[in-house]
Image (cartoon, helix red, strand yellow):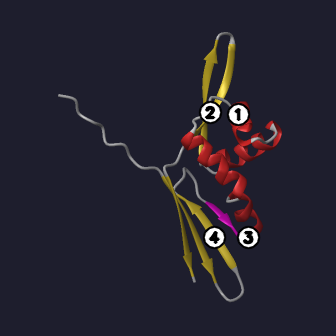
Amino acid sequence: MVTKKKLKTKIRYVDVNVSKDSFVSKLTGAKKSHDFSDVKLLRSLLSNEKARILHILKTEEPRSIYALAKSLKRDFKSVREDIKVLERFGFIEFHAERTGKRESLRPVLAIDKLEIIINI
């Protein structure tokens, strides 16, 4: 009889608190939490291009940053910069893989779910 292991879902939460004079958000669920007091910083983390990266990582599972950039039809340098931001906030991680003598870093999703909670 084969038993299935129950995998733990990895969730990141973005709590957004809006008041009359301020906007404060906090990213939690990672190894450490991050506070965003600036809307621009949060917006750059949750941009359309980064959402496309997360989608491609989930659906196509590219074997390298180069393959990811090719799938996105974007230049390598821009994709690498976006990937570094996503890694910093715990959305993705890198797995080293060897192909012959070459080693490449494979970007892999580190989360299963992202929840945005807006408290007004």
- Indicate which disc residue 25 carries: 4
- 10 Å crowding of disc 1: few (<14), some (14-19), many (20+): some
Q: Label 3, on which residue?
A: 39
Q: Amino acid at mark 1?
A: Ile
Structural distance between the alpha carbons of marks 3 and 1: 28 Å
Q: Residues within 10 Å of mark 4 (few under 14, many from 20)?
A: many
- The amino acid type, in three-letter code, at marker 3 is Val
According to the picture, the residue beneath numbered tag 2 turns out to be 62
Looking at the image, which is closer to me, 118 or 75?
Answer: 75
Q: Which mark is residue 65?
A: 1
The amino acid sitting under disc 2 is Pro
- In this rendering, is residue 39 above or below 63? below
Place of residue 82 in the rendered image (x, y in percent of width and height, measured from the top left): 74, 47
User: Which of labels 1 and 2 is toward the front?
Assistant: 2
Whole-number angstrom distance, CA of label 1 to CA of label 2: 7 Å
Q: What's the amino acid at mark 4?
A: Ser
Q: Earlier in the sequence, mark 4 or mark 1?
A: 4
Residues packed near mark 2 inside 10 Å, few (<14), some (14 to 19) or many (20 plus):
some
Q: CA distance from mark 2 to mark 4?
A: 31 Å
What's drawn in magenta, residue-wise? Answer: 34-39
Which x, y percent locates residue 1?
17, 28
Q: Residue at x 58, y 53 (%)?
A: 32
Say if mark 4 contacts mark 1, CB within 8 Å. Answer: no
